[in-house]
Each structure stands twice: as structure tokens, then as C-alpha cells.
Amino acid sequence: MSDEADILRDPEFRNMLKLRSRWRWGLSGGLIGIYFAYCLAGIYFTDVFARPVLGTAVTLSIALGYLIIVLAVVLSLVYIRAVGKLLETPIVRRGQGQ
Amino acid sequence: MTGSGPNVTAIVIFVTFIVASLGITWWAAKQTRSTGEFYTAGSKITGAQNGFALAGDFMSAASFLGVTGLIFIGGSDALLFVVGVVVSWAFILFAFADRMRNLGRYTFADVVAYRLQAERLRMFAAAGALTVAIPYLIAQMVGAGSLIETLFGLPYFVAVLVVGGLMTVYVAFGGMLATTWVQVVKAALLLAGVTALFLLAMNHYDFDFNAMLKQAAAVHPRGQVILRPGGLYDDPINAISIALAFVCGTAGLPHVLMRFFTVPDAKQARHSIGYAVVIIGYFQALIVIVGFASIGLLVGQAGYVDESGRITGGANMVSVYLARVVGGEIFYGLISAIAFATILAVVAGILLSASAAVAHDLYAKVIRRGDISDQAEVTVSRLVTVILGLSTIGLSLWFRNINVGILATIALAVAASVNFPAIFLSLFWKDVTTRGALAGGVTGLVVVVVLIVLSPTVWVNAFGNAKAIFPYAYPTLFSVSAAFVVTIVVSLTDRSARAKTDRAAYDEQTVHAEIGT
């Protein structure tokens, strides 16, 4: 399995792995963190979450829920674009061509 | 129910769907000969098609009928579920899509067994897959039977036979290709149906969302409370457990994970989840509005909801009642038929994942140790599909009065507590060992089952005891943590020769997982 060992030692591959991890865990951690905070904040700050937004019947709780849905969709699209580009490196192509 | 007989539109549309789906199955059967074709449609599904199929898997009757009902009862707290679904799919994209596709072939067990001791892990993964699939199948079938009984006036056992029989035919003959296309057609129908329901309902309020929410709070027996948190949950442990059930559970559902392997490569896998996230996000965003809009239109309507908020036929009926109020008999028939098609498509996907666990992981890989011809494995898979299909029909008739909610809870909680830790740690943690993964998985399974039995849902509601021993409805915070802790501790203290092999293979796994060779 020296091919894998070679790829793994390649600085270009290691750099790609590092960037990939950053995207993976940055976005996962960020989004899940926001979701958990949303779940708990509704319990601990009920009155704040019950406040109307811009004088409408829409409460902060409903508005934030929708914002997180939009955020999840937008981040997904950003991720697909970014990672697609990240993987277009010579080392990945060489590895796939083996 | 409102007293009228079977709805002709519903029957016509549903029969059309059945004829079309059987046509798809016939077409797919002609192209399904090898194991690759049977389990993963020869990995020739495109990202867009797979995105619709994945979204279809998740837009089950539970989300279409269940979430509207949940909003009707609990108001904005139901957003915890709705948001959780979208977040969980984005998480699958970020963390799993590439690695799963690059390492697996037919089932998620392929991925877990990539560097850990294959036979033991496959047995464990197959058990995990079945513990998720069987309760999930029974939950859907019992729900379908009762729904069809109400909507079409068919006796319960006939309804269960129709759903069970069709799902078995789709999978046994058409494999993944038929299952995928039935799911794609249904997803398109469901999206169109929910969009129409949203437009017709909002038309009653002249598309004034403010007026719609005010009306909902004005007529709901709980008033303003439905627009603020606290309608359903006021306990942090329950809230976190629900959140964990979604985030970890979705990524542990075998029928969802299996769809990663139906596309040609990791790029298409990413794209398919991208499509799924957009479709599911759109669907969930609409369903919340439909739920709130239904309150103002249904509360106090004779035959649907009485003044105290009690819904005739249960909370699952909210969507179909709303369809009748805003769109008349024809639209009511359309939405009923779509609800039925939804259940049918979802059970087919779950049945296929259960068949693959038994035929591929247990029989071909463990019992026969891989010494089986491709043709023979396909025959075994078809046979297993029929046996599992018939067993599910039998169980659904037997457990007719079981609480469907309990079974659905079990499925997602088991997926989160048993499958998820093993998949996650084997993909991302070098030091996980076979012994650790097995010990953690068994712990997750035992803890999740014991806590569900001791919870209010089973201990009080099903067994009739006065007070639950475990006070929370969802066990995931405890069961997922237990599975992770045990896997980590056992792996770190594992000094066996096997452990060395497990750890040594991580680097090679990482290269394959990242670039796919």
C-alpha cells in the first residue's frame, strides 16, 4: 500500500486534508451549535423568544427557526462549491487516476 | 371522520399511482440482475434524482401529516423538529457524504467494516439496521392502515395487505432502481401537493401572514402560547435529546445511508445531498405555515376540531382536513392519495435496507464468508425481501393498536445510539477498535431500549403505571453519550493484536475516504 503512504506524505494532500477538515468541522460545529443554542434558548429565555418581530404576530422563536433553516441551506450550497474546488488538486486527480 | 363515503378522486389518483409505480417496477426489473443493480441501481442514479429520492425518504407521512399535527397542538415548539431535520441533512453533507460514498459499496456496514474486523462488525451493523428498520416499518404500516381505513373506507387488514404487498413487489422485483423512481415520483407529487395546500390555505388569508398567525392565536384554545416556546417542551434535557435524535439519528438511518451508494462518485453524493437539503428546507418551511394556517381554518369547524381543540381522528388528520376545507372534495382526494403514496414509497426504501442487511451483510458476507455467486445473492435478496415483507404485514396486523409514535421514537433513537457512534468514530477517529465499536454499540442499544421502556411513553401510557421511572420522553442524550463513552474507553484500553491492525489501517482508509479510488 505504498501508494497510499506516498499520497499521505504529500504536503499538497496534507494541506488539502487540513482545509477539508476546517470546512467539515467548522460548518458542522457552527450549525449544530446554533441549533442546540436555539433549542435551549427557547427554554431559558422564553420571554425574549415570545417577543414580536417588527410589531407583527411573528415571534422571535418562529423567525429564528426560519433563519436557521435558510442558513442550513445556504451553508450547504457554499460547502458544495468550496469543497468541489478544493478537491480539484493535482494530488487528488493523481490518486483517483491510479 | 366527516361521515362521507370513500373519496372517488382519492381512489382514482391512488390507483393511477399504483399502476404507474408497477410500470416503473416492471421497467426496473428488466435491468436488475446483479447485486450492484439490486442494492444500488448499479450506482447510475444522478445527483438530482438521488436528491429527490433522499428528500422523499425523509418527507414521510411523519413529516407531512405528523408535523402539521404537531404545530396544530404545540405551535412554535414544533420548530425544534422542523429545524432539526434540515440541520441534520446539512450535517450529513458536511461530515459524511464523501467518506460514505468513497468507502462503501452496498450498505453502511461496508463502511464500518472497512478497517475493523469485518464479520463481527457486519453482524452488529446488520442487527443495528434491523432494529431500526423493523419498528420503523411497523410504525409506517400501522399508521398507513389506520389512515387508509379512515380515508378510503377500506378495512384495516386490506389496507395493510395493499401497502405491504406493493412494497414487497417494488423491492423484490425492481430493487433499488424501482425503489428510487417510485420515491422520486412521490417526492415530486408531495412537493406539488404541499405547495398547492400552502397557496390555497394562504389564499384564505389573502396571503397576509400576520393576519394568519393572529387568527391562529385568537382561536386556539391555548391562545398566544402557540406562538412562543413552551407549548410542547419546557425541559432542557428533553430539548437536547430531541435535537440529538435528529442530528445523530438521521445520519444513522440505514435506508438513507444506502442511497449514498446509488450515485457514481463522491461529487454526485455531495450534489445529491445538496438537492435534498434544498428540497427538505423548502418542504419544512411550507409545512410550518400550513400547520399554523390550519389552526384558524379548522378550530371550531364541526366534524374536524371541537372548541377544546380535539381533532377528530387524531392530529395526523390535520393536513387532509385542511385540504378539504380549502380545496373541496377533489383536492381532499388528491392530498389523501399523496399521503398514501408517501407511505408506500417510504416503506419500500426501508424494506430494501432491511433486506440488504440480512442478505448481503449477514448471509453473503458472514454466513457464506463472501463465497457466493452474484446471481445467487440476488436470488437470496429477493427471497429475504418477500419473507421480511410478509413478516411486516403479519406484525402490523398483530400490533394494530400499538402507539405509532413509540415505534418511530425507537427507530430514530436506535439509529442515533447504535449506528451513528460506530459510523462516526470509525470514519474520524484513528484509535477506535473492533472491540470498542462493538462494546459501544451494544451499550447504546441496551441503554436506548431500557430507557424507552422506562419512559412515560411506554411505562405510563402503554403499561398503565402511575409514574415513569425515567422521566424523559427521549433517551438520546443518555444513550448516545453512553455509546460514545464506552466505545472510546474500551478502544483506548484495547491492547489486542486486532486493535493494532484496526489502528494501522486508518491512514489508508483516510486516503481512500478522501479521494475515492
Image (cartoon, coloured by chain):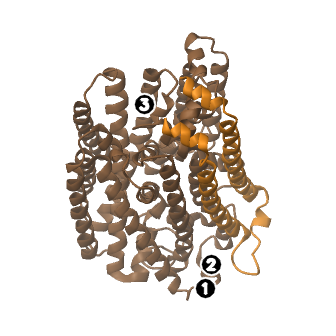
Chain colours: A orange, B brown
Mark closer to the observer (2, 1): 1
Above or below, B235 against B200 in this view is above
Q: Earlier in the sequence, mark 3 or mark 1?
A: 3
Q: Is residue B324 left or right of residue B307?
A: left
Q: Are labels 3 and 1 on one chain?
A: yes
Q: Amino acid at mark 3?
A: Ala
Q: Are labels 3 and 2 on one chain?
A: yes
Q: Secondary structure at mark 1?
A: loop
Instruction: Report whether residue B475 is seen.
Output: no
Q: Amino acid at mark 1?
A: Asp
Q: Earlier in the sequence, mark 2 or mark 1?
A: 1
Along the line of sight, the residue nearer the viewer: B470 or B282: B282
Residue for badge 1 = B208
Instruction: Report whether residue A35 is seen.
Output: yes
Q: Position of residue A60 (x, y in %)?
A: 73, 69
Q: Position of residue B246 (x, y in %)?
A: 57, 49
Along the line of sight, the residue nearer the viewer: B330 or A26: A26
Q: Is residue B141 left or right of residue B98?
A: left
Few, some or many C-alpha atoms within 10 Å of disc 2 (few <14, some 14-19, many ≥20)?
many
Mark 2 belongs to chain: B
Q: Position of residue B354 (x, y in %)?
A: 36, 39
Residue for badge 3 = B127
Whole-Å distance between the Cαs marked 3 and 2? 46 Å
Q: Earlier in the sequence, mark 3 or mark 2?
A: 3
Few, some or many C-alpha atoms within 10 Å of disc 3 (few <14, some 14-19, many ≥20)?
many
At a point 29% along the width and 61% down the height, the residue shown is: B149
Mark 3 belongs to chain: B
Q: Amino acid at mark 2?
A: Leu
Along the line of sight, the residue nearer the viewer: B359 or B299: B359
Residue for badge 2 = B213
Whole-Å distance between the Cαs marked 3 and 1? 50 Å
